[in-house]
Amino acid sequence: MNRLLQTIIFTLLAGFAHAASPYDNPDTIVVARDGTGQFRNIADAIEVCRAFMDYHKVIYIKKGIYKEKLIIPQWVQNIELCGESRDETIITYDDHANILYPETGKGMGTFRTFTVKVEANHITFKNLTIENNAARLGQAVALHTQGDCLKFINCRFLGHQDTIYTGMEGTRLYFDHCYIEGTTDFIFGPSTAWFQQCAIHCKANSYITAASTPKHIPFGYVFNQCTITAADNVTKVYLGRPWRDYGYTLFMHCTLPSQIRPEGWHHWQKEREQTARYLEFENTGEGAAIDKRVTWSHQLSKKEAKEITLEKVFQRNEEWHP
């Protein structure tokens, strides 16, 4: 190889190396509103992550209030957004469904109101709060998910109506030791989601869940060892109502307060009594009595309950063990 060609190749390689992002490595990125991190905004930290990473990368978010309408795009994966403090690391926004677009005079609609939208797969959120702090002027989503294999560990989700929208059928979500609050249908959508030892807080007389599980998907929402609570002024709460035919929701080993209505469930539309998959097993608390439950809900036998495992609920062609 002649010297001129060697020089050209060396120059090109040096240029590529220089062009590589300094963040294209497994190291932690730090975000801090006070300027002590590499970025002040979470969105900027996500932007520098390489597409379809095959290694685990942490975006560490220091305490602070981050007013961002945040999208985790589908071309990133294996990112963990880890807050310094669950209660003091807050991602917040305030869109609601009835905000009007001046050019059309039409409202924003439910599905554009998110504070955080996760389009990507294999994303973890840990030790932080996601909030939609809009006034009670309509649907206002805090978390909107579309990706598969998403984990939420020790997080808070704050809002009113439609706090969490699990928006894509066939996707799997895992919530562990999370706090979720809302008023109406504040956990809703078609995804398969397992809620492990979560605290679910009802802020109004209304419905906790509104599953729209498709007929061909065997599991929808599973609440295991969760604790349901209600605000002081709340007296009548339903465990759920089916947003679409075949909605699936199971509460097992959960603590249900006295505010849970004796019938437990609502049909939304009468004909959905024929298709809704509403299940309970060995719940406790004043709201757990089953003698007045609607006849179209089902109390699992011990044999049936044994079959409801995390592995089975999340079973797909691709194995995932959150």
Image (cartoon, rainbow, N blue to C red):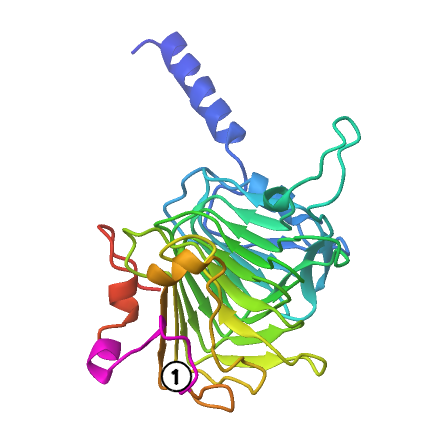
> x and y percent of residue 90 in the render?
68, 61
Residue positioned most to the right: 102
User: Can the viewer see residue 290?
Assistant: yes
**Alpha-carbon neighbours of circle 1 within 10 Å: few (<14), some, or many (≥20)?**
some
Q: Which quarter shows the C terminus?
A: bottom left
> Residue 289, position in %: x, y?
44, 88
| Quadrant including the N terminus | top left
Can residue 127 be seen from the camera position used here?
A: no
Residue range of the region highlighted in magenta in the rendering: 290-306
Q: Toward the viewer: 66 or 136?
A: 136
**Camera-side residue: 135 or 275?**
275
Q: Which residue is mark 1?
A: 253
- Tell me where residue 123 appears, x and y as whole percent: 45, 53
Q: Nearer the viewer, residue 191 or 89?
A: 191
Residue 23 % position (x, y): 53, 43
Is residue 11 a member of the stretch shown in magenta?
no
Decide: is 316 above or below 313. above
Rendered image quadrant of residue 149: bottom left
Q: On the rendered structure, is 172 left or right of 200?
A: left
The amino acid marked with disc number 1 is: His
* Kind of element beneath mark 1: loop
Residue drawn 60% across the image and 59% down it? 163
- Name which residue lies at 64% across and 51% down: 115
Camera-nearest residue between 259 and 291: 291
Q: Residue furthest front?
A: 270
Q: Name which residue lies at 30% across and 52% down.
A: 215
In this view, 56 is above or below 180: above
Point 59% across, 81% down: residue: 229
